[in-house]
Image: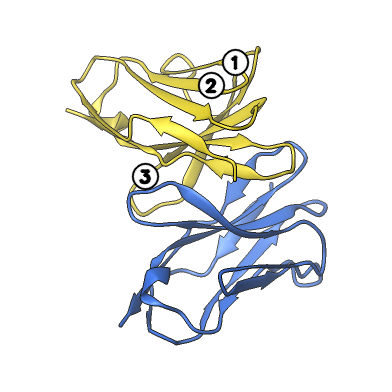
Chain colours: A blue, B yellow
């Protein structure tokens, strides 16, 4: 079945460090891909998305490119801030609109 | 942007009682809503897909008689946890799909059964 695999956390970084969270997927066909962020005690917020191969999603300094050849959608940010501390989820969906989530990666940014 | 309001944010109930959680789309019509359950430090598990005017579709392993879903209007879906027990304690999150292939999530409900 369709699935998403994320790098395991937790990830701890210093402010202004470079962040990468790896995400690969297994699916029949070409799903839409998403990154969601969850702050403590809250629901999920869409961070960015890409709906077809080679699309680049970007938001708040975060970027991810839909790579069909490597079935990947890695999340990157060049300079993280303490406020970026959260849990990040990679997800995919098809026409049935169900979202399949990765396990989540906890990121902690220290001042 | 689109907003999904979920209430209550926290609820504590006694074992054996039922709890209702509401999920409302505030500025758009949601023909489809989704209910997820999240265990501590784990990912979201899809419980069911709620379709306006029809029966919900439950994922394998989810007891439909325990987790009752009603989607009576285009802006409201409810999840009722019936005869709750401590093992039902969890974080429940709803999501609504907009026509533009976007998903908006509620802020979640922390259920504690004592």
Residue closest to the eye, A7 or B12 = B12
Q: Earlier in the sequence, mark 2 or mark 3?
A: 3
Q: CA distance from mark 3 to mark 1?
A: 29 Å
Identify which residue is drawn at 65% across, 27% down.
B29
Identify which residue is drawn at 39% across, 57% down.
A39
Which disc number belongs to residue B73?
1
Q: Is B111 on the left or on the right of B31, as rendered? A: left
Estimate how packed mark 2 is, as few (under 14), some (14 to 19) or many (20 or more) residues with alpha carbons within 10 Å.
many
Q: Earlier in the sequence, mark 3 or mark 1?
A: 3
Q: Quadrant of residue A17?
A: bottom left
Q: Are marks 2 and 3 on the same chain?
A: yes
Estimate how packed mark 3 is, as few (under 14), some (14 to 19) or many (20 or more) residues with alpha carbons within 10 Å.
few
Residue closest to the eye, A98 or A76 = A76
Residue closest to the eye, B29 or A90 = B29
Give the secondary structure at mark 2: strand
Which disc number belongs to residue B76?
2
Q: Which residue is denoted by mark 3 in the rendering?
A: B39
Q: Position of residue B82 (x, y in %)?
A: 35, 15
Give the secondary structure at mark 3: loop
Q: B40 above or below B69?
A: below
Q: Position of residue B38 (x, y in %)?
A: 41, 43
Estimate how packed mark 1 is, as few (under 14), some (14 to 19) or many (20 or more) residues with alpha carbons within 10 Å.
some
């Amino acid at each position: 079945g369709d699935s998403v695999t994320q790098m395991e956390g937790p990830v701890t970084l210093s402010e202004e460090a470079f962040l990468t969270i790896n995400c690969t997927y297994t699916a029949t066909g070409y799903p839409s891909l998403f990154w969601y962020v969850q702050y403590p005690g809250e629901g999920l917020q869409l961070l960015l998305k890409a709906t077809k191969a080679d699309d680049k999603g970007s938001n708040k300094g975060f970027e991810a490119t839909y790579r069909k050849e490597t079935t990947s959608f890695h999340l990157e940010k060049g300079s993280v801030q303490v406020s970026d501390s959260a849990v990040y989820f990679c997800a995919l969906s098809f026409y049935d609109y169900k979202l399949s989530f990765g396990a989540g990666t906890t990121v902690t940014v220290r001042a | 942007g689109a907003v999904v309001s979920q209430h209550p944010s926290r609820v504590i109930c006694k074992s054996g009682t039922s709890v209702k959680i509401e999920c409302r789309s505030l500025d758009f019509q949601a023909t489809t809503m989704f209910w997820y359950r999240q265990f501590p430090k784990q990912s979201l598990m899809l419980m069911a897909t709620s379709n306006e005017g029809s029966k919900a579709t439950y994922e394998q392993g989810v007891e439909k008689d325990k987790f009752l879903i009603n989607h009576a209007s285009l802006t409201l879906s409810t999840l009722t946890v019936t005869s709750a027990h401590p093992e039902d304690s969890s974080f429940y999150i709803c999501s609504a799909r907009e026509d533009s292939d976007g998903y908006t999530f509620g802020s979640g409900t922390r259920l504690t059964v004592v």
